[in-house]
Image (cartoon, rainbow, N blue to C red):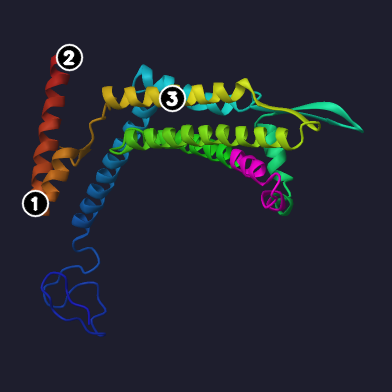
């Protein structure tokens, strides 16, 4: 059974009027002003929290010259994958001598058309099994490295969060390790396949692109370490909740300050602000 919000009288089905039959208060509009104030406070508090996130996002990208440089260094490794990463030369009795250059586009074509059953058969071979383990490992390594680079680029949006710097360095480290593993595994594949089929596979070697790629990753790792050491100053925009600075408001709420006291402080803060504005206008006049 419903009760009057003011006097607590129990209301029956016969109490159809908008006013309490006991105290006469309007049941619809009672406390509306307080509810509106609470909603306004909640909206301003959420805006203050969101503004901090926006300020950190802005600092992550343009907080300093180093953060601006980091944006480009985060993109360059992806571009470096379009360079020749490796090459394989082969010929045969009825095959013209051919050299295939491998880069990101070629890797995509290889993976999209890869016959996994045939690959697992080759891996199980006693002759070329080790070579094709290296082949699979090289593909997985470079793809994982690319994934870590992309994730690191996306995570720049949170670079100025409390765990932003460690996260960036970890993803950079994983990208470098994956790329190095890919290089080691490709060399294993190259040595094995040229030894097993010296007349068919005449050469399998790394291209300059993979070294450019790893070099870009090392530069990105270095700049993230420097940023972590020097830090990035986040310039927070001052926000208010009912005229009270947002930081002070959140501290008061955390301490358990009652709403009545908060609203009284807000009224005083707004009155003081209006007084200062009036004084400024009089000085200008």
Label 2 crowding class (10 Å Cα cut-off): few <14, some 14-19, many 20+? few
Give the mark nearer the N terminus: 3 vs 1.
Answer: 3
Whole-Å distance between the Cαs marked 3 and 1?
Answer: 47 Å
Q: Which stretch did the figure color magenta?
A: 120-139
Q: Quadrant of residue 61?
A: top left
Q: Which residue is mark 2?
A: 284
Q: Residue at x 69, y 49 (%)?
A: 126
Q: Secondary structure at mark 1?
A: loop
Residue 53 is left or right of residue 113, and the answer is left
Magenta-span inclusion, residue 132 = yes
Q: Nearer the viewer, residue 135 or 199?
A: 199
Q: Main secondary structure of the magenta part?
A: helix
Where's residue 167, x and y in %?
36, 38
Q: Which residue is mark 1?
A: 257
Q: Residue at x 52, y 36 (%)?
A: 181
Where's residue 120, x and y in %?
68, 52
Q: Residue at x 70, y 44 (%)?
A: 128
Give the mark nearer the N terminus: 3 vs 2.
Answer: 3
Q: Which mark is residue 220?
A: 3
Q: Secondary structure at mark 3?
A: helix
């Amino acid at each position: 059974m419903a009760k009057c919000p003011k006097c607590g009288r129990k209301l029956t089905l016969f109490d159809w009027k908008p006013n309490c039959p006991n105290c006469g208060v309007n049941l619809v509009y009672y406390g509306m002003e307080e509810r509106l104030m609470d909603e306004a406070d909640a909206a301003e508090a959420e805006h203050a929290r969101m503004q901090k996130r926006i300020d950190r996002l802005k600092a992550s990208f343009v907080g300093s010259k180093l953060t601006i440089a980091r944006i480009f260094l985060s993109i360059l490794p992806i571009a470096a994958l379009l360079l020749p990463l490796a090459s394989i030369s082969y010929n045969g009795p009825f095959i013209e001598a051919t050299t295939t250059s491998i880069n990101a586009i070629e890797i995509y074509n290889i993976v999209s058309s890869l016959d996994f059953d045939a690959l697992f058969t080759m891996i199980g071979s006693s002759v070329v099994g080790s070579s094709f383990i290296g082949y699979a490992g090289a593909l997985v390594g470079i793809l994982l490295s690319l994934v870590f680079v992309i994730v690191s680029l996306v995570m720049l949006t949170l670079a100025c969060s409390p765990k932003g710097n460690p996260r960036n360095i970890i993803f950079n480290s994983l990208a470098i390790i994956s790329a190095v593993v890919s290089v080691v595994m490709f060399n294993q594949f190259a040595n094995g396949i040229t030894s097993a089929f010296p007349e068919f596979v005449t050469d399998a070697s790394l291209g300059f692109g993979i070294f450019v790629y790893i070099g870009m990753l090392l530069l990105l790792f270095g700049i993230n370490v420097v940023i972590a050491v020097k830090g990035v100053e986040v310039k927070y925009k001052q926000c208010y909740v009912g005229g009270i600075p947002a930081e002070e408001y959140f501290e008061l709420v955390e301490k358990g300050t009652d709403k009545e006291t908060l609203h009284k402080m807000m009224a005083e803060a707004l009155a003081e602000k209006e007084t200062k504005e009036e004084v400024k206008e009089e000085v200008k006049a």
